[in-house]
Amino acid sequence: MSFNSFIEVEESPTLYMNTLMKDLHSAGKTIYKFGFGQSPFQPPEEVIQASAQATHRTEYTHVQGDLTLREQIAAFHKEANNIDCTPDNIFIAPGSKILIYSILSSFTQADVLVASPSWVSYRPQIELCRHHLINIETNYENRWRVTPENLREAASRKKHTASICILNYPGNPDGLAYTKSEMVALAEVMEEFNILVISDEIYSLLHFTSPPESFMTVYPNTIVTSGLSKWCGAGGWRLGIAMLGDKVSPMLKAALIGIASETYSCASAPIQSAAKVAYNSFDNRKDYLHYQTSILQEVSSFCFTELNKTAIKLYPAQGGFYLFPDFSHYEEQLSDKGITTSQSLCERLLQDTGVALLPGTAFGMNQEELVARLAFVDFTEPASGDSFSLETHAKKVKVGIEFLTSWIKQLT
Ligand SMILES: Cc1ncc(COP(=O)(O)O)c(C=O)c1O
């Protein structure tokens, strides 16, 4: 008997690109990995120790996670981003990705508003839940941001009573954040259209100045997601969190508990023990966060400054791991080489130079928009006590950016 009624979900483009790069690498090519956004930093030593010492924990925990950990997370994020959330309204899960999916799947039918560009997994998740995806079109001129105007335009295309909007800052793929007044203006439109916001703040603690305030502070019908993957360098540990604002429906919370208990059950107990050390106090983490953000800022401003010497359009990153260069100035020259899409741009660049970027299409952009994501995290951490130097620790980033800029310059 054969089945042919499968849902079509392609392999996540970030993972696909990683596989492609591995293939080229095994064929002997040097790859400058600007495609994949994994943290180059290790978790603090005491957090690693705590995970090693907790392997005896084999029990299932409370479906929302250990209560003491939730209490710590509530205090930590109050201090970090001014989030007011009781431990009761916090969910700990194996990654924030599954939490976003669980929130989306709590609705039978919904309109989900999401910007292009935005993180690769939102769209497939919306499709898996069979929701109605409404694209919020952004552009270089408005800094790839959701604005009251483009939000209102998208919200006016609502079909269902339930509406969700996913925001993300500092953004993947653009590295850009919202000011408090921009958030207040967005919140007014969210309120007007009665929209539940999922605010993906996974890069928030890696904002290059101080962590921005959470969207929840301006709009209580918000669920904030975060976790250990980015600021604590522990993506593979799979520990994500969701914090529910005061105005989030209790029925949604009940649905989330149901979904969690019938799917992933809980986050790994030993990793929750490690997270208790990671989240023990925001004050204790300030030095660790500053250490990471100062290196990230140095690497990103090097990339920005070099790329800015060409006619590539881009904004300096405000936080996180990414820049989002726009190659549209070179449209004609690229077209002469047969390059008319972001996919063919990234393929040709990879073949010619070994520089791997991720095409804009992975982030919901139209294929003819010549944009790509550049992750600037292919560097090594200095040994403890050493200071960071681009020359020593980020040599491949330097060389890769040189190759990329020479490739672009020879087009003209
Ligand atoms: C914007 C964004 N949201 C969510 C995630 C998923 O994080 P987690 O490891 O917590 O599932 C990522 C990971 O790359 C991301 O970039």
Image: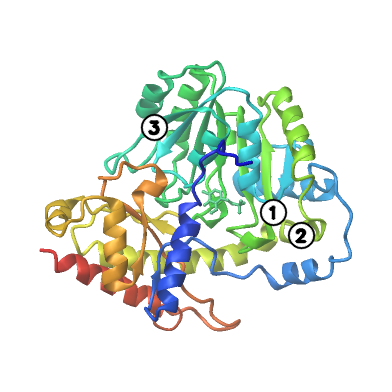
Q: Which residue is mark 3?
A: 136
Label 1 Cα neighbours within 10 Å, binned few <14 / some 14-19 / many ≥20: many
Q: Which residue is mark 1?
A: 239
Residue type, label 2: Ile
Q: Residue at x 73, y 70 (%)?
A: 48
> Residue 374 at x, y = what percent?
38, 60
- The quarter of the rendered structure image containing the N terminus is top right
Label 3 Cα neighbours within 10 Å, binned few <14 / some 14-19 / many ≥20: many
The reply to whether callout 1 and callout 2 are in contact (CB within 8 Å) is yes
- Of the image marks 1 and 2, the number of the one nearer the N terminus: 1
- Going by the image, does 393 lie left or right of 369? right
Residue 91 vs residue 27, the one in the foreground:
27
Report the residue that reaches farthest toward the front.
Answer: 1
Residue 184 vs residue 122, the one in the foreground:
122
Q: Which residue is mark 2?
A: 271
Q: Is mark 3 within 8 Å of ligand 1?
A: no
Q: Is mark 1 within 8 Å of ligand 1?
A: yes
Residue type, label 3: Ile
Q: Residue at x 45, y 50 (%)?
A: 172
